Image: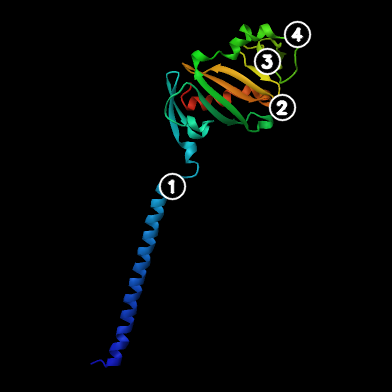
Amino acid sequence: MLTPSAQRSDASPVGFNIAAIMLVLALCGVALAYAIDAASRQNREVPHGFEEQTALTRTIGGRDLEIPLSWFRYAEQRVEGFAKQIDLRLSAPLGPNGEARGIEVTLLPKSLARPSSRLLDGVYLHQFLPEQLSGPPGLVGKPLSGKDGFEGETVWYDPLSADPFVAKCGAPVTSGAEARCLRTVYLGPGIAAVYAFGADVLANWRSFDEIIEPRLASIGAY
């Protein structure tokens, strides 16, 4: 028969083990609660970069385009539905030495735009001044007369192509500002694009379409 002191000695390790087990279970419960709460917050929070991967459906020129939110130039256009005009901004390695440049893209119904390549023969040719400017290899630069609002503008075009690259560039508005260029093209059925970009992009004019077209094709514009 165990003495009272022996009984207390045997009971102490048992009580300690039970307390330790209960403490471990309690800690596991707390850890599980934290894990569930963290997972819940992660589901509620918008992950970094989520906006760039989220697209809205805009319909223009009879075509549905899936456009990432980060492409829109103006916040008010970040709504779904029909549009008469969609203003986008893309970053592309079209600057000197492949530096990134912002390319503004305005999408329009084809009926509201005329490609720059057609304007070359139909409009610009009749406004050319006699002199010819030197510039990016492969392009001819012709200044326009001041008639019909063309004062201070120059047309740069590829003279060897049946469907030439054509861009009309205006003189800088303020001292120190860069010249800006416009180019209009037809994309897929029903859609035209007006590109606006800095004049230094002209040096990479041969790469312009091969870089920009796949991006517009990815949203359904081709």
- Mark 3 surroundings: few (<14), some (14-19) or many (≥20) residues within 10 A: many
For the point 64% across and 28% down, which residue is it?
94
Marks 3 and 1, how far apart in space?
Answer: 50 Å
Q: How many numbered callouts? A: 4
| Label 4 or label 3, whichever comes before in sequence order | 4
**Residue 183, label in figure:** none
Q: Position of residue 156 (x, y in %)?
A: 68, 16
Nearest to the eye among marks 2 and 3: give it.
Answer: 2
12 vs 198: above or below: below
Name the residue tied to disc 3.
155
Judge from the rendering whether residue 33 lies leftward or rightward of residue 164; answer left or right.
Answer: left
For the point 70% across and 9% down, which residue is it?
128
110 vs 74: above or below: above
For the point 65% across and 31% down, which residue is it?
98
Marks 1 and 2, how far apart in space?
Answer: 44 Å
- Based on the displayed image, in which of its 4 quarters is residue 131 positioned? top right
**Residue 174, label in figure:** 2
| Label 3 or label 1, whichever comes before in sequence order | 1
**Label 3 with label 1: CB-CB less than 8 Å:** no
**Residue 130, label in figure:** 4
Nearest to the eye among marks 2 and 4: give it.
Answer: 2
Marks 2 and 3, how far apart in space?
Answer: 20 Å
For the point 45% across and 23% down, which residue is it?
83
90 vs 185: above or below: below
Do we see residue 29 in this rendering? yes
Name the residue tied to disc 1.
45
Residue type of the residue flagged with mark 3 = Val
